[in-house]
Image: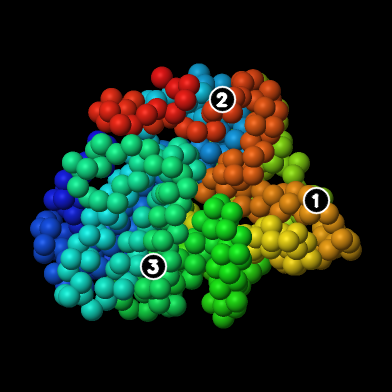
Amino acid sequence: MKTIQIYIFTALALFGILLSGCKKFLEIPLPTDRFATEGAYLNDNSTGAVLTGIFSTAAGSILYNGASTQYETIGFRTGLYADDLTQIQAASVNAIAATTSQFYLNGLTSTNSTQWITLYRQVYNCNLTIENVESHKGNLARYNQWMGEALFMRAFSYFDLVNLYGDVPLALSSDYSITNFLPRAPKAQVYAQMAADLVKAESLLGETYLDGLSATTPNRTRPNKFAAAALLARVYLYMENYAGAEAEATKVIANSALYQLPALTNVFLANSNETIWAIAPVTGSVVRDYYLYTTAPAVNATQVALANISPGTMSASLLNSFEANDQRIANWTVLKTTSTAPVNGQFYYPAKYKSVVNGTEFLIQLRLAEQYLIRAEARLKQNNNVTAAVQDLNLIRQRARPATPAGALPDYPATISPDACMDAILKERRTELFSESGHRFYDLKRTGRIDAVMTAAATIKGSTWASWKQIWPIPLNDIQLNPNLTQAPNYQ
């Protein structure tokens, strides 16, 4: 595939350039103007710099953080594509609105390439690193950390690829003469590779958080053993390996010295006790979600003025999924209003990230609440264990419960039916994880509920839904260059 035809020198040079813009805890004191393939892996410091480059690339990627002018994060675009976000103004407002309309109206074409290209570049960088770390194993005292980190990031990249594109090419080599002609691999095969990568990463990584020099750090921005376990729990859940999902989630939950459920106001602070793994914005930036949702003033003159700054607002469907007195609404959303025509309205936006001070918040990719939700579902799916499932759900609800009035947001009873328990799990996943990492879109797909939900949502959007739209199109350029690669059905 052309998207992963990245020459070795270019990739390593990019790593070096990115080092100069990283936060200090990611920086390594190495020359950043040039690297040679062999020299990049001759010792632990230089190899650590290469891994730092991979994390730095993610930190600056439009899929996760990006620049304040970009509206391309996975959480934002999948939220629009599904039913969590609403585009509040027509496509004619500006270029940003024109782009978001493709996602909001479920009208993607094969010109949409951002996610595909960026994710496969991450895969390529990981493959190149895995190969070279292995071939230079004898030189590396900290081999376990470097290999574990690279395997983790490859699995992390493939998770979004299969959930956006279905069956995808499984590239496990940096040799573009091979990867350029790969066909789609069955999704089950890609999941199996993710699981294998994460099992190995978990066995290699230690329990403490380390930096690029393998020194202990308070920053949870490089994966440790429990980050690998947390991502593996997610992968197992999607694979319907429920025993495995429960076991991996329990490993994380059981480490109460490291991971806890803090107050709602502290969840998204940098290195909160809930963080399992996060992406740190590069120096001079803050978490992208702040710009996506929170930048606009509280009162805006018109809906157009608001849309020019923040085009995607929380949908009525999402707002209605919260129960009365749920404190996640009070703590994790913000109200914006318009005072004049065309609409005098109130618009709620996600506000999980609130700070304009670099380093105050990190973009959390794995957190403890998700592990409780994973375990709840895994327990339910094993012999309809409703009692154990609601125990985990109620821990999440208790944090969101107000002190008054009494009886607000009550516990789920252990007597609810298995079907009602599954509905509760998906409801709690939505109200807990909204705007994060594509969870809503992915949940609708994996549970077989997407067609019913999106048919109703499309009516509200003024568009139409068809089941084939749950798979996104591959960029036309890659289809043309790779005779073995087929387009998703019904895309040109």
Q: Which image quadrant is residue 151 in? A: bottom left
Q: Which comes sooner in the sequence, label 3 or label 1?
A: 3
Mark number for residue 420? 1
Find residue 457 and report its horizontal and vertical position in percent. Answer: 67, 29
Where the C terminus falls, by quadrant? top left
**Label 3 belongs to which residue?**
200
Marks 3 and 1 sit apart, C-alpha to C-alpha, by 37 Å
**Label 2 belongs to which residue?**
105
Of 241 and 359, the residue lying toward us: 241
Asked whether residue 267 is in view, the answer is: no
Find residue 270 and report its horizontal and vertical position in percent. Answer: 49, 65
Find residue 22 and report its horizontal and vertical position in percent. Answer: 31, 59
Which residue is rendered at x = 35% and y = 41% of the image? 169
Asked whether residue 257 is in view, the answer is: yes
Marks 2 and 1 sit apart, C-alpha to C-alpha, by 31 Å
| Residue type for callout 2 | Leu
